[in-house]
Image (cartoon, helix red, strand yellow):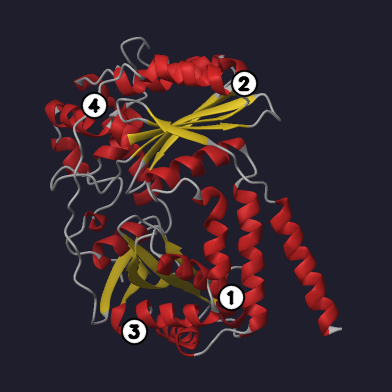
Amino acid sequence: MKKLLLRSSAILLCGITTFAQEVNYEEYDLDNGLHVILHQDRTTPIVTTSVMYHVGGKDRTEGRTGFAHLFEHLLFEGTKNIEKGKWFEIVSSNGGTNNANTTQDRTYYYEVFPSNNLKLGLWLESERMLHPIIDQSGIDTQKEVVKEEKRLSYDNSPYGQFLPVLGKNLFDVHPYKDPNIGYMKDLDAATLDDVLVYNQKYYVPNNAVLVVAGDIDLTETKKLVKDYFGPIPKGNTITRNYPKETPITTQKKATFNDPNIQIPAAMVAYRTPGFTERDAYVLDVISTYLSDGPSSKLYKKMVDDQKQALQVGAFNISQEDYGMYVVFGLPVGETTLEVLYTEMEEEIEKVRTTLISEKDYQKIQNKFENQFVNSNSSVEGIANSLARYYLLYGDTSLINKEIEVYRSITREEIKNVASKYLNTNQRLLLEYLPEENPAN
């Protein structure tokens, strides 16, 4: 019976691997340094046009945080040829959708149109790059938009502050110590000249990648790309030399009071390597082992069996320069945060000191195979992945071969990486607490 089950698992795994279609693409550079990636998929008459800029929250000077996030909003204000406030109307009236998002490391803009509107998508993104209207009125408007977003997503959202608090306590000198959205006092102090200089530095073709994916004719698309983006002037070379963090060798402790919660949280965090490092992939595997699904080690133990936690999890927050590995738990009833810390550490210690079982190892491999298949299930997702792998990892081909990294990770490697980064003397213990009632 055991052999039969193993054979069935092997057949299933083979089927999953076979089903994952290779993503074909073509990439090249324009003379101005813009990297172009084209992916043809004619199964559905839609096209995604997207531009990812290598600029995020970490790209700032002291006292001027949050500029990349401000620009995420600001570059929808209007251009030389797009009237202020008309961007979204143009997109929707032509059957499209669009959005943007910013992390600490990059900013991503994209449109999804019926494929007969490819030219419109390319024109919009070329306008954003070449002809943005940046004036005091637009800056003032978008500052208020950002402040409202901060109030909704951070200040007034349960557990909304945990990422900024972790960053502040895990990093001493690297810009990751400051929140991606920035400090509002810095945005208030920003001048028009500050914003213009930022735009001229980062929103240039040689600091970006353009991805066109979907129902396209490659020859026609190349011509359109050259017509719309070729005339855009190349920017100055950008150099980054952010300060390095001194390794954490003594346990840190911190507390934070959140007025929006009633249940406290026990959080443990570790500073880990950037996402291009192999060890970061191994930490992803450890997260899946500890907390992905009801049969995972932390969930089964602390939620199901011992009923100490309402929720528990472990996840690797991937970033370019350093990552943050976070384990958290929400207590049940009279369970203390100390109990949660103890129980979480017990499971982490097992990963540090013993090999996970072959059964658990195979289950993890199957999960990553499934994730790999699903990640390339839409043209929109493929466009994002192509941009990200080129711009941040420096290897577009990872869209097809990153799964090979996960397949090659061994049980011994899991143990070694856990013992390298997830030790008690390298961690931050954060007590994330309800705000104290002054009346008490």
- The three-letter amino acid code for the residue at tag 1 is Tyr
Query: Which is more foreground, mark 1 or mark 3?
Result: 3
- SS for callout 4: helix
Query: Which is more foreground, mark 4 or mark 3?
Result: 3
- The three-letter amino acid code for the residue at tag 4 is Asp
What distance separates the C-alpha of mark 4 from that of mark 2? 34 Å
Query: Which is more foreground, mark 4 or mark 2?
Result: 2
According to the picture, the residue beneath numbered tag 4 turns out to be: 140
Q: Earlier in the sequence, mark 2 or mark 1?
A: 2
What distance separates the C-alpha of mark 4 from that of mark 1? 46 Å
Residue 211 position in % (x across, y down): 47, 32
Residue found at x 50% / y 73%: 286
According to the picture, the residue beneath numbered tag 2 turns out to be: 114
Q: Earlier in the sequence, mark 1 or mark 3?
A: 1
- SS for callout 2: strand
387 vs 117, left or right, is: left
What distance separates the C-alpha of mark 1 from that of mark 3? 21 Å
Residue 334 visible at all: no
According to the picture, the residue beneath numbered tag 3 turns out to be: 424
Q: Earlier in the sequence, mark 3 or mark 2?
A: 2
Residue 360 visible at all: yes
- The three-letter amino acid code for the residue at tag 2 is Pro
